Image (spheres, coloured by chain):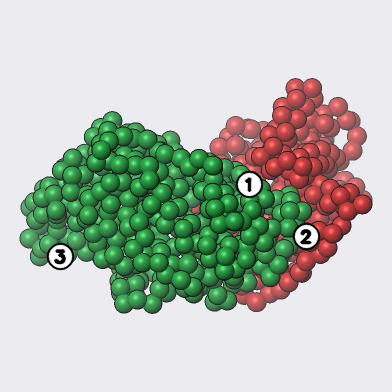
Amino acid sequence: MDTVFTYLYQVGFAVSILVLISLGLALIFGMMKVINLAQGEFLMLGAYFCVLTSSMGAPLWIAIPVAGVLVGLFGVVVERTVIQWLYGRVLDTLLATWGVSLLMIGIVTTVAGPQSHSISSSVGRVVVGGFVVPGWSMVIIAGAVLMLLATYLILRFTNLGLIVRGTMQNPQMARALGTNTSMIYMLTFGFGSALTGLGGALLVPLFGASPTMGGLYIGKAFIAVISGGPLPLIGTMSASGLYGSIDGVMSYLFSPVLGEIIVLLVAIVMLRLLPSGITGGMRKGI
Amino acid sequence: MKLTRRQFTKLSGGGLAFASLQGTLTSAGLANEAPIKVANILDQTGGLNIYSLKQMKAVAMAVDEINTAGGLLGRPLELIFYDAQSSNQLYSQYATQALLRDEVHAIHGGVTSSSREVIRPIVQRFGGLYVYNSLYEGGVCDRRHVSTGMVPGQQLDALCPYVINERGGKRGYILAADYNYGHITSRWLQKYIRDLGGEDLAVEFIPLDVSNFSSVLARIQDAKPDVVWSALVGAAHMSFYRQFHSTIGKDEMMIAGTTYSIGREQVELSPEEGEGIILATSFYDSLGTEAADDFVSRFHEYSGETDYIGEYGEGGYRGLMLWAEAVRRAGSPEPDAVIEALGDTSFRGAGGLYTIDGQTNHTTMNIHVAVQNDKQDFEAIQTFDQMDPVDTQLVCNLHENPDDTTQYEVEL
């Protein structure tokens, strides 16, 4: 029984980390076909905003949503100044967002220094199946579930969510019906950025914040999103679930190295069999 | 860095030349002499920059102090800095560039053992001299290479008996970075643990970009060791200390680190995440000696920074001063002349007396076993005076085999 819990925890934690780092990217890529190479740096910015807010005296559970909101606002600024001129030009957005990422690393290094920062959480330790695990990893798992749930509820049940989905499916028709699609793009980009910032902030107590931390996650985020395919929610959940389970089990059974190797092998085989991702053949869903 | 006190000139292709202010050179009577050039290649950016930032400035400070005091052999020192951006490919490019285009008299720098092994053959091929200012896994036997940092015969010789015999850390679990430093150091750890009657339960190698240690921590809890030996390297691995604190905790299990503190981990982690970690080092800021206090205050004044400097910063200063002393003894900055003069060259620095052993081109120094307190600082437990690089001395004799370039590795 202990072993079962240990595996469940390893898998749950690995899946949650993947969801945190890739959900924002999946929304932006899946709904707007914008490849945001600065995704890792949006995460990093979320982590830094969280460190900054909590160093000004705010408790963690306030600092984290504040970080999400601030990164969301930053995303809106980036969308208005850079991305909005480049819709439909995939290669150009790639270059532009890469530039944004370099700029962000440079600015954060200059302002906050190249060293890493951390905040200890006061959540303590939790015993799962005879093993001590960080209480904070339970917060991370809960955070990932909440982020998925919130995204689903907003896109599925609100009027705004309907308009967003409509705009993504057929922008011309949406415009003909009187929707301000430019505003919708801006909001979606902002929302994706906010989710990413939230993810970055949630990582801080266990992983710290440093200017180059984005590079550690960007590869995994892209693998999850590309494997997930065009539907952001189902895609993220299925790809994160698949890769997280493999990584969690293999890392625990053997080593983190083997875990990553097998994840990459599975990704290669999967993209050969399903070139447009897990959700590539689905017509309905989010 | 205070830009007011020095001149920077951007060179093409990655180099950043540093020269002391013209006024300094004029008042030292050096303004019209041909400079002695020295290259420093380190990672100003990227995941390994935690080891380099203080060392860059400490080397620049050493150059400035030498120039202010009248230069070297009546000539000014010119420092050319290259940012290798934590990439071994750039180490190879800049080492070649430094020797061929910039025609430096010596190359300092390199952080990881893999970067050192990239630089060494290039220095060998073009007949240069390389000073590696970093602790490492030992065994490099090469007359064109000088090691000024600790090797296992110094560091582990001090650390392991304390942890195993005095703290009861018989059962050890080894975590090491997945490249040559971690692989060879883990074998040294196994050897020391076994020789001291302890047990090495497991060795795990962790790639430099892994920051999620949840599976590793689960396996450690399975194995229930007394102590976790950490030879982890780089910014991503710092998460280990965070995640260890929030799972097992140091009340339950000790951590002894071979690389801990050199990346200034203790100031970047929160006080509780680092408290109690055991290490052996040749220098830390609060050693309490007059020489250490003096070095720290000079560095703070020079750099305008007031935070922790640590072994890698002091190591860069130490390395440049040792090399400069060898140049004085040789009466020439030419690499081959300096190499002849290396043996028994010594420098009294912030951590005590450093002396180059001519048989191995490694350095004899004081080693301190220390434990981190609750104020992000270290407290000395034991000090070992003038420890020789015994591991490398066992296998390397440059007097008898001057053409040797091997890195000898420990056998289990």
> What color is chain A drawn in?
red
Q: How far apart are marks 1 and 2 (CA)?
A: 21 Å
According to the picture, the residue beneath numbered tag 2 turns out to be A133
According to the picture, the residue beneath numbered tag 1 turns out to be B203
- Position of residue B250 measured from the top left corner of the image (x, y, whole percent): 66, 67
- Position of residue B306 measured from the top left corner of the image (x, y, whole percent): 41, 72
Viewer-proximal residue among A148 and B76: B76
- Position of residue A164 measured from the top left corner of the image (x, y, whole percent): 82, 45
The answer to whether B313 is drawn above or below residue A29 in the figure is below
Mark 3 vs mark 2, foreground winner is 2
Q: Distance between the residues labelled 3 and 1?
A: 50 Å
Say which residue appears at 38% left-offset and 52% top-offset.
B390
The answer to whether B16 is drawn above or below residue A67 in the figure is above
Work out whether mark 3 precedes mark 1 in sequence or the reverse, and give the earlier one. 3
**Left or right of residue B122, residue B268 in this image:** right
Viewer-proximal residue among B32 and A23: B32
Mark sitting on residue B69? 3
Asked if marks 3 and 2 touch (Cβ < 8 Å), the reply is: no
Q: Residues within 10 Å of mark 2 (few under 14, many from 20)?
A: many
